[in-house]
Image (cartoon, grey):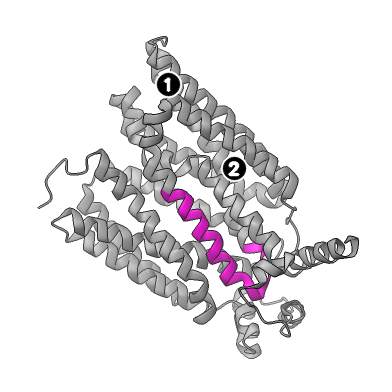
Amino acid sequence: MIKSGVLNKQNAGWFGSLMTVGEIFGGSSGGWCIEKFGRRKSLMIASVPFLLGWVVMLSSSTLTYLYAGRFLTGFSSGLVTVCVPVYIAEISTKSMRGVLGSCTQLFITIGVLLAYACGLHFDWRGLALIGAIQAVLALVMSFLIPETPRWLLGRNQKAEAIQALKALRDSHMDVQEECRDIEEGLDPQEDFAWSGFLQKPELSRPLFIALMLFTFQQLSGISAVTFYTVLMFESGIPDLAHGATVAVGAIQVVATFAACLLMDRAGRRKLLIIAGIIMSASLFIFGLYYKLQASNSLSSTMNTWLPVCSLMIYIVGFSLGWGPIPMLVMSEIFPSRARGAASSIAILGNWLVAFVVTKEFMTMQTILGQDGTFYLFAMFCLMSVMFVWKYLPETKGKSLEEIEHYFHEKTLMKKSIL
């Protein structure tokens, strides 16, 4: 049996960051997987390491097995973060793509909330068993969904694509017309090559935008905050730490649900800008809290509720914008011929930054102090607002083909100016 207390600060850092290591490998494999086997089969494949990882952790007797299980579940998470956004984007209508695409993050937050809540009542073996059951359900449910019409049409399987559209759309819709629109936007004459990311601005520009969105998402400190929420609360409100963590998870679900409703009304750009400002302000307050706490300048009431309130405001801001939107935008802005490869690169960048932030969060606190660490995250949030203002086009209400045409036109305009 694993000895209690074996997850000291160093081991906890590795246990938290090993999932992101697995996600790095899974994410980089996801693009190849969805192009080779299709979006639907890739989702089936992703369920298998999930199941194996939870079973390994469930039956583990040493720390090594826990690490191995954590890595396997991370690998599947990396696959899923490539497959699911692409799948949803390719089966959605342009009027519903924002809502459905945001649901990816919504269900992630629901999963986080359930993990927090279950952690109050189950030990780690019980949590591993729950994870294994969920992996089995995911595998079974993946047999019930159709392949995406765009992937089928890209492989000249028009009859299968029409059947998939019929399964996905209302029975009264003219799927033949939508099928023709998709075919016209596929541009089968142009093959994809990896060198295109360096040579063609219509590929490099959306890749740059996606990479920067994911980078700023992680530099906001969300991975560190999510993994170390209980530890952060224990330093200020030890008696309420676990209950406050569950409350934060619940707030995140509600705010992400609100983002789903606003996504196709307010637009991606506006939500990201508002969210970045909210996050920056709340992180600055959090840094101020640690500074005042260190100098014993806080009353008992402020010491209890200031970190809870500031963190909840931060979670609301993140959930409104920087939680759901980067993954949604990634699934929208890449051309169909490069969607798998580009998504893999973007997700790889995402999890590389997440690994560094999660692994070195405690080191950052040692070097910069707890207040300095949150001031740094606040500065990155302000930088993210400026980036969105300057570089991100609005994709609300546009079809995937229209978005692809936008980047192509930008390239042509730049060439004509030169």
Which residue does the image show at 67% across and 82% down from the upper left? Answer: 191
User: Toward which corner of the image does residue 245 lie, by quadrant?
Assistant: top left
Q: Which secondary structure type mostly characterizes the magenta part of the structure?
A: helix
Q: Is residue 306 magenta?
A: no
Q: Identify the magenta region.
A: 331-355
The secondary element bearing badge 1 is classed as helix
From the viewer's perspective, is 79 left or right of 148? left
Residue 345 in the magenta stretch? The answer is yes
Q: Which residue is mark 1?
A: 290
Nearer to the camera, 181 or 219: 219
Task: Answer left or right for 202 relative to 346.
Answer: right
Picture coordinates of residue 326, whole percent (x, y): 59, 53
Using residue 399 as the reference point, say whether residue 147 is left or right of it: left
89 or 414, which is in the foreground?
414
What residue lies at 25% left-to-right and 56% top-to-bottom? 67
Q: Nearer the viewer, mark 1 or mark 2?
A: 1
Residue 304 against residue 130 in the figure, above or below: above
The extreme right residue here reads 417
Residue 323 visible in the picture: no
**Kind of element beneath mark 2:** helix
Viewer-proximal residue among 247 and 60? 60
Residue type indicated by callout 2: Leu
Q: Which residue is mark 2?
A: 320
Q: Label 1 sits on what residue type?
A: Tyr
Instruction: Pinpoint residue 4: horizontal percent, then vertical percent.
Output: 14, 43
Task: Report the Cα–Cα distance between label 1 and label 2.
Answer: 26 Å
Where 401 sits versus 216, above or below? Answer: below
Rendered location of residue 85, percent (x, y):
56, 63
